[in-house]
Image (cartoon, grey):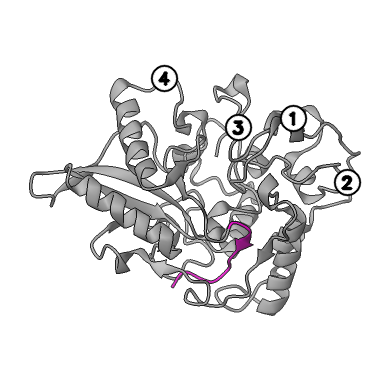
């Protein structure tokens, strides 16, 4: 979620998505490099913006080349995200859904970076049309009363409206991740805490909706709450990218609540920022936090790690279950 440049207060990371400074040093816009990896001379595992892919990156894989800008050229994702004729009929206007799916799949194949262990495998957009076909389960089938506030199903998010693909406020995950999350919830309840879920599986069409929103520079309704220190034009590439690890079905965003003795009245702990706060302050180990805020983030991380989840250091609320059941497959079935 955050720029990894040291000058902005975040420590460079070769974990989930690193190397943004390298793309900046190369003199090209990061989205252009993502859209044209072959032209940019990028090897498998090339760096991606923090909201992108959640794949590991080694320092030796940082790009060092660039290519000339062409004013008339545009990335393939720009065409997909902005051309309404490619949108399907399930909440999108015009066009044929299969044309959209084919175009999106082609884009993902061109831009998805792979970890070294999977570099020889071909990433794919799953043909699944339903959650059942994608083997995604409702977390409430494991914990019926888990607290949920699915942000992208409503208007309390950085887009300021319901996001494409969210037809219901549900948390869908692959069964191993859902089972692990249930273990976390049970352990925390015994200590007087509970989880609150903000987002889980995210359809690929929702990520495309993020990009369309980012291109609309006139819409700054959510600036004060989500990117108060940035111009909106800086979000695309550094914070919003065409691929999200959430679309693989084992990643979720969540908060930690403290409850009363009966576990009925729960309130969120002070974590230092809210959800989707585009700023280095959202980094899990960012300097400048109070002792209480740092302890609260640590409590959440320890509980999640004990069940097999790994935190993304750029976002204190972001966790991925490992090993992922489908590390090279993205899904685009609606949440409903």
User: What is the spatial separation of the Cα atoms under label 4 and label 3, in whole angstroms?
Assistant: 17 Å
Distance from disc 2 to disc 4, alpha carbons, whole Å, reads 40 Å
User: At 39% across and 39% down in the image, what residue appears?
Assistant: 274
Residue position marked by numbered label 4 in the rendering: 288
* Residue 95 appears left or right of 65: left
- Of the image marks 1 and 3, the number of the one nearer the N terminus: 3
> Residue 131 in the image: x percent, y percent?
48, 73
For the residues marked 1 and 3, what is the alpha-carbon distance in whole angstroms?
12 Å
Mark 1 vs mark 3: give the one in front: 1
Q: Which residue is mark 2?
A: 39
Instruction: Work out how far the residue at label 4 is from the one at label 1, CA to CA, in angstroms.
Output: 26 Å
* Residue 95 seen: no
Q: Which mark is residue 22?
A: 1
Helix, strand or loop status at disc 3 = loop
Query: Label 2 crowding class (10 Å Cα cut-off): few <14, some 14-19, many 20+?
Result: some
Label drawn at residue 3: 3
Callout 4: helix, strand or loop? loop
Percent position of residue 306, x then y: 35, 43
Residue 11 lies, with reference to residue 205, above or below; the image says above
Q: Earlier in the sequence, mark 4 or mark 3?
A: 3
Q: Nearer the viewer, mark 4 or mark 1?
A: 1
Point out the stretch of residues depicted in magenta: 327-336
Residue 71: % across, % down: 88, 45
Q: Is the residue marked by circle 3 packed among few (<14), some (14-19), or many (20+) residues within 10 Å?
A: many
């Amino acid at each position: 979620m955050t720029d990894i440049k040291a000058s902005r207060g975040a420590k460079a990371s070769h974990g989930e998505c690193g190397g943004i400074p390298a793309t900046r040093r190369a003199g090209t816009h990061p989205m252009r490099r993502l859209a044209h990896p072959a032209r940019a001379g990028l090897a498998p595992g090339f760096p991606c913006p923090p909201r992108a892919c959640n794949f590991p990156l080694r320092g030796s894989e940082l790009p060092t080349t660039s290519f000339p800008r062409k004013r008339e050229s545009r990335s393939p994702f720009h065409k997909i995200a902005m051309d309404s004729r490619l949108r399907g009929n399930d909440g999108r206007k015009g066009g044929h859904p299969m044309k959209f799916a084919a175009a999106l799949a082609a884009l993902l194949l061109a831009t998805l970076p792979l970890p070294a262990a999977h570099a020889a495998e071909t990433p794919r957009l799953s043909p699944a049309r339903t959650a059942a076909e994608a083997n995604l389960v409702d977390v409430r089938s494991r914990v019926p009363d888990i607290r949920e506030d699915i942000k992208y199903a409503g208007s309390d998010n950085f887009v300021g409206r319901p996001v494409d693909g969210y037809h219901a406020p549900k948390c869908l995950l692959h069964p191993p991740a859902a089972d692990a999350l249930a273990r976390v919830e049970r352990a925390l309840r015994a200590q007087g805490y509970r989880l609150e879920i903000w987002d889980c599986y995210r359809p690929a069409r929702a990520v495309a909706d993020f990009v369309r929103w980012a291109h609309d520079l006139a819409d700054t309704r959510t600036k004060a709450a989500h990117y108060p220190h940035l111009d909106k034009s800086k979000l695309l590439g550094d914070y919003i990218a065409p691929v999200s690890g959430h679309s693989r079905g084992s990643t979720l965003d969540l908060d930690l609540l403290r409850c009363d003795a009966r576990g009925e009245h729960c309130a969120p702990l002070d974590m230092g920022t809210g959800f989707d706060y585009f700023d280095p302050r959202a980094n899990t180990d960012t300097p400048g936090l109070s002792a209480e805020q740092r302890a609260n983030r640590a409590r959440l991380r320890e509980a999640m790690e004990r069940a097999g989840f790994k935190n993304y250091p750029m976002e204190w609320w972001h966790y991925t279950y490992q090993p992922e059941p489908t590390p090279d497959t993205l899904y685009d079935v609606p949440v409903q």
